Image (spheres, rainbow, N blue to C red):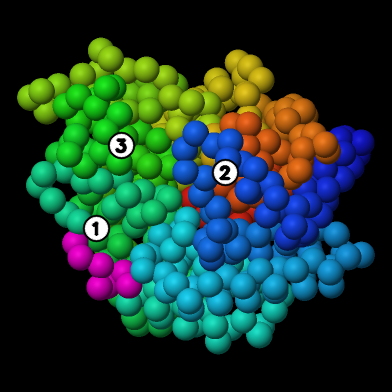
Amino acid sequence: MTPALADRARETAWLILTRLADPAVVADAVAASRQRANHPFDWGGPGLFTGLAGSAVAFQAAHRAFPAEAAHWRGLAHQQLVAAAQASFSAPLSHCGISAGTSGLAFAFADSLREEPRYGATLDKLNTQLAAQVIDTPTWRSADGVRDSDYDVISGAAGTLGYLISVDAPKPVVRQAIDALIDDLVWLCDPERWFIPPHRYPLASYSDRYPHGYVNIGLAHGIPGPLAALSLAHQAGYQRDGLVEAIRRTADYLVGLPCWWPAGVPLTESGAEDRDRLEPGRIAWCYGAPGVAAALLNAANALQDKSIRDVAVDGFESVLRNLAPLPEAPLCHGVAGLLPICALFAEESTVARKSIEELTEHVLSHCDEDAPLVVRGDGLDDPSLLTGSAGVALALLTATGDVDNRWTRALLLA
């Protein structure tokens, strides 16, 4: 990246984070967005993707990126962590998920623990609480199909597993929870089991596109998420019966689809796959080739399989070579989400390395200092990590090399 572009990216990230550090600016922006939104505007509470824990991760990144102001940003990160913990006391986190559950809050404390040993006791308690929640969660295994929220990155087992396998020297109860999550995802990773029937759809409108059920192919909510989580678990040294076979089976299934990867594979009334009705997914982390290719690259690394790696690289490079300007910036479904995927592919792909500058320019084109939080997605001012300004700032600081990519474990990339 040229020094001039790096400076622009760094300055824009700093401006975003400065706006996010002003509670009044954030409150006004959120209030206005809630009035304009056509759907529920998810912001607040202790969550990582949707609330205070995500802000803490963003401010801790600023602490690393802007050493002259390190104490200022570290103090802001601490304030967010304290507020997140207090919010979880008043409204206890009842589920495990990385987005708005216990694993997300633990992720934020673990991120700050890298520089702040004082968080060790709190993190240990959170990890123990999370492990107990995992173990006590009723089984979602069913011969009648599954819900995406049971297993996905956002709310389900894949995202929680991605965090827990990053815990150093896990206690026996944490190891028990990890084993349980791996076993559940190994069970899931079978074409006879990973289908989502209509009565388990999150929204009734899904029936318009998939009247008889479908297989979700997005990294955020589909089977690439379990594939990525299991692959990372295997690379971290975890071994369970059927683990390698589940990685292989799921990777082979995805390799067998068109390498632009659809959002979903529809089922017929008899339950067979209807591949004549496949439609390309988004060009994003959440759905489409970038996220699926990232999951396949993790699988290739786990299995040491060059053929899977080649499909992953070819699929992602095809996106980059034919990339039109994307309409939004956020990590989830916008151009910022492609930056950490480029970092993941950097050792494998010259195209990915060279695309970082172009993608950074795309991200900056969506930033407007006159917007309350600098970034505006879906016409809304969103402070969050996954779909808003905090995530864009993180992506920019990672692209410049000012912070490492460990935070992208929350997206099952690192």
- Label 1 vs label 3, nearer the camera: 3
Decide whether residue 33 is among the magenta residues: no
Q: Which amino acid type is shown beneath numbered disc 3?
A: Leu
Q: Earlier in the sequence, mark 1 or mark 2?
A: 2
Q: Which residues are magenta?
A: 133-139
The amino acid on which the numbered mark 2 sits, given as a three-letter code, is Arg
Disc 2 packing (10 Å; few <14; some 14–19; many ≥20): some
Q: Are marks 1 and 2 in contact (CB under 8 Å)?
A: no
Identify the residue at image location x=42%, y=70%.
93
Closer to us: 160 or 44: 44
Pick out the residue farthest to the left. 270
Q: CA distance from mark 2 to mark 3?
A: 21 Å
Residue at the image point whose x is 65% and y is 43% from the top? 32
- Which callout, 1 or 3, points at the residue further toward the start of the chain? 1
Q: Residue at x 25, y 53 (%)?
A: 186
Residue that badge 3 annotates: 203
- For mark 1, what is the residue? 184
266 left or right, relative to 340 = left
Residue bearing mark 2: 34
Q: Nearer the viewer, residue 12 or 2?
A: 12
| Residue 223 found in image quarter | top left
Q: Residues within 10 Å of mark 3 (few under 14, many from 20)?
A: few
Looking at the rendered structure, the secondary structure element under dot 2 is helix
Identified by mark 1, the residue type is: Asp
